[in-house]
Image (cartoon, rainbow, N blue to C red):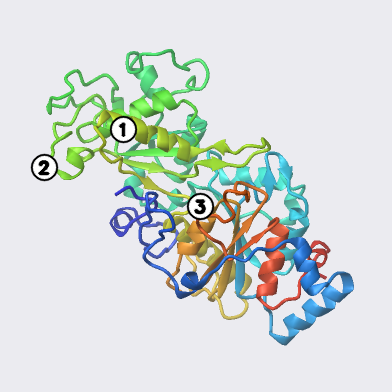
């Protein structure tokens, strides 16, 4: 079965070095319409969609300005600090900004929840850059100052969980590709992957590996020598098991984000998935064996294929959604099916809706929660990033624009500590209501106009008579 997320078997092989996460069951991208992960919380089964807009919110409570301040303060005082055990996880593209433009009100909203010491993280399926670079970019697009500490240490990219992979895996030889393969390699090196190679390394080492005009002078102009004197042209007899000692062996394939040269990448990935134990240029004798699982395909020690996310589309300034990493996967699956007579492509995925990614985000929220409450009942996070005895979060609100990733992932995630994750869908991004599709197939707890209304809805759900004006004025 194709797997989106990490299963127990894979987690046993790839334990987290810095973050202690719980083992979540796999989810499958091929689940039928309306199907969800078998491991459900009771509240997920009872969840129903609630449509809300800013206008409806104002009519229902008609609280603004000073009245909002007074009512919210009274509610908070009457129930203790209502903000102390809730948190938020924000998607970025289509929720906080579109293209290069911040969505109106988001900056002020973030300042408000930051001032109230509410825990939050930014959980995006974007990647291909370093977390620090994304922090700077997000800060600039939202018109914030780096001195405000609103974004720092809160960004989780699709490939960020790879930081916690085991050292023994990071020492393996991995093929990495993405929008900028060399940049992806540099980030992987910073994560601890010491033997990362790119498709550019291969085409420069073996001039006949790719028979078409390639991008050696542009996208693939930067390359490195293969590690340990290995060669991409060592194998001359594909079906021989007598492997030359200098043959290149790939242990993992990492699709970092949105590949640009689909033709070369699909060719190289296909070559490795039909190989004998990952040796480039070989062909496994088990391929097509009907007595084996999957007719022998990917049954001979081939490298595992990892994708940092499965987003088919994402939102930019262009009015029509743009294809993402998930589209590359669909193209690869089509080629694989055609060349293997319909065999299943087996792969692993991080990013949303992967349960491993939600575990990672949940752990990060607990770390923030521990630090913020370090003077009371929580312990500070240790130097290795573990949470220690973190005070428990009661509820986390996931605010996203993509039902297939943001909403599905939150709906299916049930952390073992019992925290409730509640999904809120905004209309500023990927999903848009149409005459043909009134509801997304993965239904959120609420559908609202934008991220500001999402916070208002969540706070009202917590018993705070919040309003949009109150929030944009700093919640004072």
- Asked whether, in this view, residue 1 is left or right of residue 37, the answer is left
Indicate the position of residue 195 as horizontal and vertical percent values.
36, 36
Numbered disc 1: secondary structure: helix
- The residues bearing labels 1 and 2 have C-alpha atoms spaced at a distance of 20 Å
Numbered disc 3: secondary structure: helix
Q: Which residue is mark 2?
A: 291
Q: Which of 138 and 262 lies nearest the eye of the viewer?
A: 262
Kindly identify the residue that appears in the image at 50 percent across and 44 percent down: 311
- The residues bearing labels 2 and 3 have C-alpha atoms spaced at a distance of 36 Å
Indicate the position of residue 145 as horizontal and vertical percent values.
76, 50
Residue 405 has which mark?
Answer: 3
Inspect this view and state whether residue 142 appears.
yes
- Asked whether, in this view, residue 360 is left or right of residue 66, the answer is left
Kindly identify the residue that appears in the image at 18 percent across and 39 percent down: 295
Residues packed near mark 3 inside 10 Å, few (<14), some (14 to 19) or many (20 plus): many
Indicate the position of residue 451 as horizontal and vertical percent values.
69, 57
Indicate the position of residue 379 as horizontal and vertical percent values.
54, 74
Q: Which of 432 and 194 lies nearest the eye of the viewer?
A: 432
Q: Can you say whether 202 is above or below 318 in the image?
A: above
Kindly identify the residue that appears in the image at 28 percent across and 56 percent down: 9
Mark nearer the N terminus (2 vs 3): 2
Q: Can you say whether 459 is above or below 305 in the image?
A: below
Inspect this view and state whether residue 371 appears.
no
Kindly identify the residue that appears in the image at 46 percent across and 52 percent down: 161
Res. 227 image quadrant: top left
Residues packed near mark 1 inside 10 Å, few (<14), some (14 to 19) or many (20 plus): many
Q: Which residue is mark 1?
A: 336
């Amino acid at each position: 079965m194709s797997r989106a997320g990490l299963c127990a078997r894979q987690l046993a092989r790839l334990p987290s070095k810095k973050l202690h996460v719980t083992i979540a069951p796999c989810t499958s991208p091929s689940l039928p319409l309306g199907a969800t992960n078998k491991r459900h919380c009771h509240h997920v089964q009872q969840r129903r969609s609630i449509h809300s807009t800013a206008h409806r919110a104002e009519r229902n409570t008609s609280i603004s300005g000073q009245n909002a301040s007074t009512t919210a303060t009274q509610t908070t005082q009457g129930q203790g600090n209502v903000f102390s055990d809730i948190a938020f996880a924000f998607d970025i593209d289509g929720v906080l900004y579109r293209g290069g433009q911040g969505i109106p009100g988001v900056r002020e909203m973030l300042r408000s929840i930051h001032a109230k010491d509410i825990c939050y993280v930014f959980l995006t399926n974007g990647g291909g850059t370093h977390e620090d670079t994304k922090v700077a970019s997000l800060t600039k697009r939202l018109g914030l100052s780096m001195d405000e500490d609103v974004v720092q240490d809160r960004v989780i990219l699709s490939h960020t969980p790879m930081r916690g992979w085991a050292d023994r895996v990071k020492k393996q030889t991995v093929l990495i590709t993405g929008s900028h393969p060399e940049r992806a390699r540099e980030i992987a090196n910073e994560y601890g992957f010491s033997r990362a190679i790119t498709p550019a390394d291969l085409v420069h080492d073996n001039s006949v590996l790719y028979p078409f005009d390639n991008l050696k002078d542009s996208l693939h102009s930067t390359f490195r020598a293969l590690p340990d004197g290995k060669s991409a042209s060592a194998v001359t007899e594909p079906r021989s098991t007598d492997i030359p000692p200098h043959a290149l062996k790939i242990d993992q394939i990492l699709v970092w984000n949105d590949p640009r040269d689909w033709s070369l990448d699909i060719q190289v990935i296909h070559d490795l998935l039909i190989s004998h134990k990952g040796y480039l240029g070989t062909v496994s004798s088990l391929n097509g064996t009907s007595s084996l699982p999957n007719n022998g395909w990917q049954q001979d020690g081939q490298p595992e294929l990892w994708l940092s996310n499965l987003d088919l589309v994402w939102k930019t300034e262009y009015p029509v959604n743009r294809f993402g990493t998930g589209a590359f996967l669909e193209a690869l699956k089509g080629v694989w099916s055609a060349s293997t007579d319909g065999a299943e492509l087996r792969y692993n995925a991080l990013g949303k809706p992967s349960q491993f990614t939600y575990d990672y985000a949940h752990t990060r929220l607990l770390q923030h929660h521990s630090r913020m409450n370090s003077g009371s009942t929580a312990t500070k996070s240790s130097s290795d990033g573990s949470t220690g005895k973190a005070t428990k979060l009661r509820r986390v609100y996931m605010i996203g624009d993509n039902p297939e990733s943001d909403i599905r992932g939150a709906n299916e995630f049930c952390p073992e500590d019992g925290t409730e994750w509640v999904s809120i869908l905004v209309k500023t991004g990927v999903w848009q209501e149409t005459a043909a599709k009134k509801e997304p197939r993965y239904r959120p707890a609420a559908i609202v106009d934008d991220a500001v209304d999402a916070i208002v809805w969540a706070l009202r759900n917590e018993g705070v008579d919040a309003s949009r004006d109150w929030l944009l004025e700093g919640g004072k």
